[in-house]
Amino acid sequence: LQRWPDMPAGALILLGTFLTSMTGSRQSSEVTFSELGTLLSDAKCIASLVCLGCIIVGCVAYMSRRRAELEQAAQARPSNPNIAEVLLPAVVASGCGCIANIALKAVGELLKTKAGFWHVGLWLLLGRFAAIG
């Protein structure tokens, strides 16, 4: 754990968690499988997921194509690496984490409504693929 940037980053994450918890919906509502499908078919959701997917695929493709160069740069500057190169795997991991989090939230909602095994299993499968991304 470093004082910079880990401490401020951790504080911002905690602040974000606190703010989303305090300003989140207070209504207790249950979402069915068909309602989740409706939410996913919304144009804003589709645009967001496509954008996120393109960013993830772009970062992975860039890292794959320039693997040798990235490794050489990391070995040449171990104490002061290029921040853009350091952020590439972090962006991929956070994007996959977003998708996994959405899928697991959907699983939780479906379990509350006592949805069928196949409905829950579909979302678990999506979360699994995103988590091992």
Image (cartoon, rainbow, N blue to C red):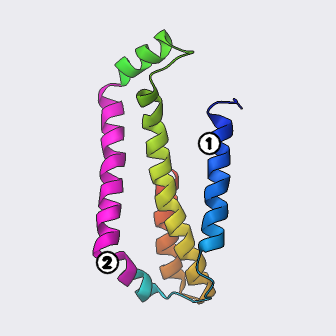
Q: Is residue 129 left or right of residue 13?
A: left
| Residue 27 placement (x, y as % from top left) | 61, 88
**Could you tell me if residue 133 is visible in this image?**
no
Q: Quadrant of the N terminus?
A: top right
Which residue occupies 61% across, 33% down?
Answer: 5
Tell me whether the residue at label 1 lies in contact with that at label 2, contact meaning CB atoms closer than 8 angstroms. Answer: no
Q: Which residue is mark 2?
A: 41
Dot 2: element: loop
Report the disc number at residue 83.
none
Relative placement, left or right, of 75 versus 42 is: right
In percent of width and height, residue 61 lies at: 30, 37
What's the residue type where badge 2 is placed?
Ser
**Amino acid under label 1?**
Ala
Towards the viewer: 128 or 4: 4
Residue 50: x and y in percent read: 30, 60
Q: Mark 2 packing: few (<14 Cα in 10 Å), some, or many (20+)? A: few
Q: How many C-alpha atoms fall within 10 Å of the one at disc 1: few (<14), some, or many (≥20)?
A: few
- In the drawing, does residue 41 fall left or right of residue 94? left
Q: Is residue 24 visible?
A: yes
Q: Secondary structure at mark 1?
A: helix
Q: Determine the residue positioned at 54% across, 15% down.
A: 78
What are the residue bounds of the magenta stretch? 38-66
Mark sitting earlier along the chain (1/2): 1
Up the image or down, 56 lies above or below 101; here it is above
Residue at 67% x, 62% y is 18
Which labelled disc corresponds to residue 9? 1
